Amino acid sequence: GAVVSQHPSRVICKSGTSVKIECRSLDFQATTMFWYRQFPKQSLMLMATSNEGSKATYEQGVEKDKFLINHASLTLSTLTVTSAHPEDSSFYICSAKKPGAQPQHFGDGTRLSIL
Amino acid sequence: AQSVTQLDSQVPVFEEAPVELRCNYSSSVSVYLFWYVQYPNQGLQLLLKYLSGSTLVKSINGFEAEFNKSQTSFHLRKPSVHISDTAEYFCAVSPDYDKIIFGKGTRLHILP
C-alpha cells in the first residue's frame, strides 16, 4: 500500500516552454503533498507543501510564480515549471501523506532537462 | 531548527562485509528520525524510522539503526551487505512528519 506515482519520469524540452509534472497517490487519499528538488549529488530540498483545496506554502527562496502547484483533489497534485530555463534542470520528487502523524511516501521522481 | 549531518559522502565496502553509515542531528525539540534509501533515478523509500520506545529499530532487509540521545546520533548498520544494497542513503529528522530535514546523503558502494 501507499503507492505514489509521478509522471513523467523524464522530460527534455526547449528553453521557454512550460512543463507539468503530476503526482498521484494511487491507493490512499493524500491531504498533503510535498514537492522537492534534488540537485546532482545533493540532498532533497523542500520547495513547497501542498494541501488539497488550498494554496501551496512555498519555502523561502522558491518563486511561486515560477513553480505553480495545484492540488485539486485528494489524489493529485501538479507542479508546473513555467518558462523553464536551463538552470531549472533538476530532479523533482513529490511525496504524499495521509492525515495525521503518518510518513511521507515518495514518487520515483522526474528528471527535467531544459535545453 | 533542526539539522542533519552525514559525515561520509561515500562509503565503499566489500560484499558480505559489515557497514555503518553515520548520522548525527541537532534539534531543540523532540523529533522523529528516519533513514531513506534512494536507488538510481528513483524516489526515496523509507527504510526505517524511530518514533519512541526501543532505541534499536530494524528493517526487513537486514538494516538496523540505533537512536542514541546523548550522542544525538542515529547510525545505520548492516552486518553483511549485498550488491543490491548499492544506493544513496539519507538520514532525516522531522518534528512533525511534515517538515522533513534531510542530510546530504551517503553513497554506499559495494565492492565485489
Image: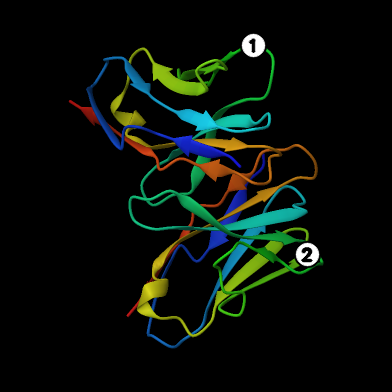
Q: For the residue carrying disc 2, how many other residues have a C-alpha within 10 Å: few (<14), some (14-19), or many (20+)? A: some
Query: Residue A10 appears in which quarter of the rendering?
Result: bottom left
Quarter holding the N terminus of chain B is top right
Residue B54 - label: 1
**Residue at the spot x=32%, y=19% of the render?**
B19
Residue on which disc 2 sits: A73
Is residue B61 shown to the viewer in this render?
no
Amino acid at dot 2: Ser
Task: Identify the chain of the residue marked 2, using the numbered disc in the image.
Answer: A
Residue at far left of view = B112
Disc 1 to disc 2, C-alpha distance = 38 Å
Amino acid at dot 1: Ser
SS label for mark 1: loop
Please, is residue B17 above or below residue A106 in the view?
above
Task: Identify the chain of the residue marked 1, using the numbered disc in the image.
Answer: B
Q: Position of residue A26 (x, y in %)?
A: 68, 52
Query: Residue A52 appears in which quarter of the rendering?
Result: bottom right
Is residue B64 shown to the viewer in this render?
yes
**Residue at the spot x=39%, y=85% of the render?**
A15
**Residue at the spot x=66%, y=42% of the render?**
A2
Q: Position of residue B24 (x, y in %)?
A: 46, 28
Q: Position of residue B42 (x, y in %)?
A: 44, 49
**Residue at the spot x=33%, y=30% of the render?**
B84
Please, is residue A115 above or below residue B20 in the view?
below
Q: Tell me if A100 is positioned left or right of A63 in this view.
A: right
Q: Are marks 1 and 2 on the same chain?
A: no
